Structure formats: C-alpha cells, structure tokens
Image: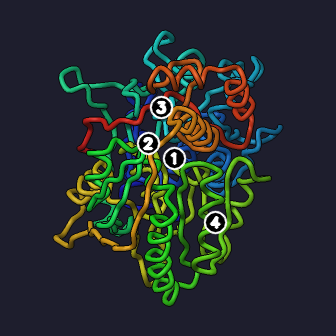
Amino acid sequence: MKLRKWQSECVEKALKYYSEGIKNFLALATPGAGKTIMGSELAKQLFEQNMIDLVFCFAPSRIVAYDFSQSLEQTIKARFDGLIGSKGNSKTYQGMQYLDESFWDLFKSHRVFVIFDEIHHCAGTNIDNANSWGKPIIEKIKYGAEYTIALTGTPWRSDASPVALSQYCDATRKIKCDYVYGLKEAIHDKVCRVPQFIAIDNDNITLTENDETQHFKSFASLLMESGLPYSKVVQNEIVVEQMLIKANSQLDRLRIVNRVSAGLIVASSISHAWKIHDILRKVLDEDALVVTSDEDKPSETIRQFRKGNDKWVISVGMISEGTNIPRLQVCCLLTNVTTELYFRQILGRILRITDKANQEAIMFMPAEAMLMEFAKNLAQDIPGTVPIVKVETTTNSVDLEGDDNPISEAENDIKDSFLTSDIDLDCSKALMWPPEITQELNKPSIQCDLSNNYERELGVYGRFKQEILEIRDF
C-alpha cells in the first residue's frame, strides 16, 4: 500500500529517533488521518531492519484493537493473534491488568516494539500520579520495550493530567509531539473532509419550574439564565425530532450520490439511545442499528455496519475515537458530554476521505455555547474562506420542565453515560461532580455495576471532568 506523504515522513522520523537511541516517539495526527496504517508500516520497517522481534499494540477498545491487528497482519504478512508463531498481538488497555508475568517476561527475552493507540487515555509521569492504565506502562513498558510509538489525535486529557510517556514544555505546559499532522494539513492533502457544523437553535422555548413559567429565545439564553442541565435539552423529544429531520434530509441527499453514506447519532445514555431509535421510527419511518454495551457482540455489529448499507447507527460511546467507518458522513451530537476532547473525537468519525464522489461531512448539534466555540475553533484550522458553522433556528415550541429531584436524575444520567461511553473513568479517583452526586456514585451498588461493566466489551476508564481546557492550538 502506498503511504500518504505524512505517513512516510512520520515513519522516517521515528526510525531516525530510534537509530539515535531515543526509545519513545509521540505522533499527533488529526482523527481520520490514518494513524493505524502508519504505525503498521513503522512496525514492518523495524522488522525488515532487524531491530525488533515482536510487536504489541494497546488500544482503548476491542474494535480498535482488532482493526490494528488486521492492519498489522496485512502490512507485515504475518499473524498477530498472540499464538505460537505469531509476530505479536493487539490488546485493550483494560486487558493490561490481566497479563501475567509470562507475558511481561517477553520484554526481557525479546526486542519488543509497542504501539499505543490514543495514548491520552493513559495518564501519569510516575506511579504516584498515574491512572490504572498508565501504571503498567510506567512499570513494565517504558524501560522494558525496545521502542514505542504513542499515537493520538487529541493530545490532552479532560482532567488535565499528564499523558503517559509524554514530555511537556516547562513554560507553557503544552505537550511536546515528535511529529504533528493537523487538520489543516490533512484537508489540504485531501486526507480528511472539510467538516460543516449545523447548530440547531429554537426561539420558542418554555421552561416550567416550581409552578413558574419562563420563555427563552435561544438555547444559549436558556442554559445561561435558568441553570437547567444541558442533558434536558438533548433529551427533549422536540429537539431530537428537529435535529433528526434535518439530518435525515441531508443524509438522503448524500445517498443519492453515494448510496452507502451513513449517519451516526451519539446519545447520552443507553435509555436515551433507544428513545432516539423510537423517534426515528415514528417520525421519519427510518430504522437504525443501536450499538451499546448492553447489546450482544457490539464490536461485531460495528464491523457489520462498516461493511453494510444500513443508513443510521446510534451509539453512546462504542463508536468514538479510532473506530474506522469511512462511509459515515453525517453525525447528530446528542450526548450530554461537552468537552472539546470528546467533541473532536466524535467529529473524527465523519472525516475520513473515501473514493466516492461526494465527500461532505456534516455535524448537527444544539446551539450550545461551548459546542459553538469548539466548532469555531476548528473553523480557524480550515483552509479557505467557506463558512463551516451555520445556525438553523426552528420555531416549533420546545417545552421543558425543571427537575423535581435533580440529584437522582443526574446520578442516573452520569451512571448510564459512564457505563456505556468511551470516556476515561477511573473509579478509584474522585469524580469532579458536586459532593452529593459523588456520594451517590460511591454507593456499593453503583460501584459494583461499574466494576462489572469494566469486564465488558467496552467500558469507561480514567478520570472524567466536564470542563473546557485552555488548549486550542492542536
């Protein structure tokens, strides 16, 4: 396979670093640029130059780990299933805790090359400040591996913890990347699509709370002046309906040119995903696959969707960073997570260029202040002067009610989102929520649910904070 220019440059630079005795290499490439192929090619060249004996890849989810093992097998023409005679294996970060000493002994007897996909899930510069995924990297791999490459499209964490195996500038505390390939360059090289953002607003909003009624002309004023949780907006049926109607119309237009174009709807929780599924059926007479950790073999469902012709897929966190479904061109952002890191990760799902005639990428979202800011930040990275952020105001009345029991509802919403999303959650560390909610999450029953789900197809790991970070230049 012919490499893209950036992939060749990155491989060449990594090999140069390794030849100079530098063992760890960090590559930043915008989501959708092709980091998996680049990492596989680097492994191939290390084998050809007799610099390594084995390759192990670690990724945040099973579907991404599987994709990496497939890419390694195709590139190197060898098995990567971890069995006798194979050249290595690909595992999840979660699976690290189950690896016994016989596995780690391979780092003593063999020259091992380790690939870390989406390294920002792993935090820590030392054992004291590391999360559960960062610890084995620091203890077992940092000095045990012959070489490593860490890959990321969003090189920071929502909790502002240091990313494992990374170095930072002393003055600015910004991460040092050994190779950078941004969205601007990827669009210029026709590696990624130009994203378009359509923010759905409303000028006829009514909020009833404690027998009092208020009226608002926009979601921004509603959220700023009322203190209503953002989750109330994305879970409102009228808001969902209006977004789905507009998104489905755009997807129908794209499918006239490209019949396999597809759309992704990102929900706030499992129950929310099924509500969206019902609305899609009742209002638009459209069906959709629902992929959550509650479903049987969700990774297999994702693979089938990737190869198929289904129009819509609804997920909470199963289809996020690293999940490669190039036919996705439309996204509805109905998650209650409003961090820039997650925003960019989700956007990356619709940016992968294909060989089809139409290469539009359209994200629909509520006109919420932070989401608008994230979109405008990205617009600054886009070459050319074409406006990519558009607000469409609907006049259908949106009726909202305040919370009679906000703590209980928040607890359920957080728990459901944590159990099904791909956001970092480390249950051993305090969550950055009001104390009463943290206390609810610390109940034995909830902790048991979280622990049990950790064994499932895809869990949630690391620390989580709903906050915006002052990192704008990636």
Q: Mark 2: which secondary structure?
A: strand
Q: Residue 94, position in %: x, y?
A: 66, 31
The mark lying in front, picked from 4 and 2, is: 4
Tell me which amino acid carries mark 2: Thr
Q: Furthest residue to the right?
A: 84
Cα distance between the residues tagged 4 and 2: 32 Å
Q: Which residue is mark 3?
A: 464
Q: Residue flagged by tag 3: what amino acid is it?
A: Phe
Q: Nearer the viewer, mark 4 or mark 1?
A: 4
Label 2 near label 3: C-beta < 8 Å?
no
- Mark closest to the chain's N terminus, 3 or 2: 2
Residue hosting label 1:
39
Q: CA distance from mark 4 to mark 1?
A: 37 Å
- 253 vs 84, nearest the viewer: 253
Q: Which of the two discs, 1 and 2, labels the residue nearer the N terminus? A: 1
**Sequence-first tag of 4 and 2:** 2
Relative side of 195 to 18, left or right = left
Question: Badge 4: few (under 14), some or many (20 or more) residues near its Cα, within 10 Å?
Answer: many
Q: CA distance from mark 3 to mark 2?
A: 18 Å
Chain-order first, disc 3 or disc 1: 1
What amino acid does circle 4 point to? His
Residue at 26 percent across and 30 percent down: it is 174
For disc 4, the marked residue is 277
In space, the residues marked 4 and 3 are separated at their CA atoms by 27 Å
